[in-house]
Amino acid sequence: MVPRITALGRPAEEEATATPAKPSPKPSAESAPFWAAANRGELMIQRCVTTGRFFFYPRTYSPFVTGGDTEWVQVSGRARLYSYIIDFRPPPSFGPGPNVIAVVELAEGPRMMTSLVGVEPDPEKLPLDMELAVEFDQRGEQAVPVFRPVAQ
């Protein structure tokens, strides 16, 4: 009997047990400082020099002032749960699931999409406004910010 070989060139039994690595972000010119900070275990976002307001996602110019200058600032890493979904069928590279995909509101104001860790994927355990703190998930050579509930 000839073993079945998959499209990836591996025996079917081997592929069924292999879990691909989680995808790693590819920094752009605008986001490179964000990802470099994550690799150092720091959460940095941009601030408008003119208004002092923080914003996220990384951009070349301030969204508050036409052509306004920006600066990168390390922020507290504290956040509150703004919204979430529970993904019961994640891609294979994200593990068996379920996973909590969230939008968090940083203490400094901007919202960002992330994953929640260290909490059961149960709506009863995920109250909105729950206090969170950043930590970093290493994916290959790149660290990715994720958030964990703060112990009450």
Image: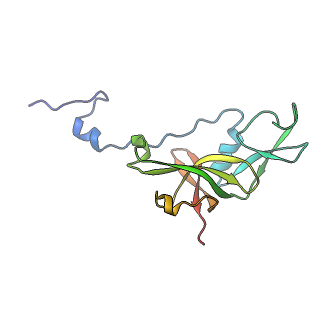
Which corner quadrant of the image does residue 58 belong to?
top right
- For the point 89% across and 45% down, the residue is 51
Is residue 93 found left or right of 24 in the rendered image? Answer: left
- Quarter holding the C terminus? bottom right
Direction left: furthest residue: 1
Q: Foreground: 83 or 115?
A: 83
- Total of numbered circles in the picture? 0
107 w.r.t. 18: above or below: below
Q: Is residue 78 above or below residue 92?
A: below
Question: Residue 46: where, in percent of width, then height?
Answer: 77, 44
Residue 91 rendering spot, x and y as whole percentages: 42, 40
Q: Write the residue at 70% across / 54% down.
A: 106
For the point 16% across and 32% down, which residue is it?
A: 3
Q: Left or right? Give the position of 99 relative to 68.
A: left
At x 83% / y 47%, what residue is drawn?
53
Tell me the quarter of the image containing the N terminus.
top left
In the image, residue 83 above or below residue 24 = below
Find the residue positioned furthest to the right: 50
Name the residue at the bottom extreme: 152
* x and y percentages locating residue 68 in the rendered image: 87, 35
> Left or right: where does residue 54 sit relative to residue 31?
right
- According to the image, what is the colour scheme of the structure? rainbow
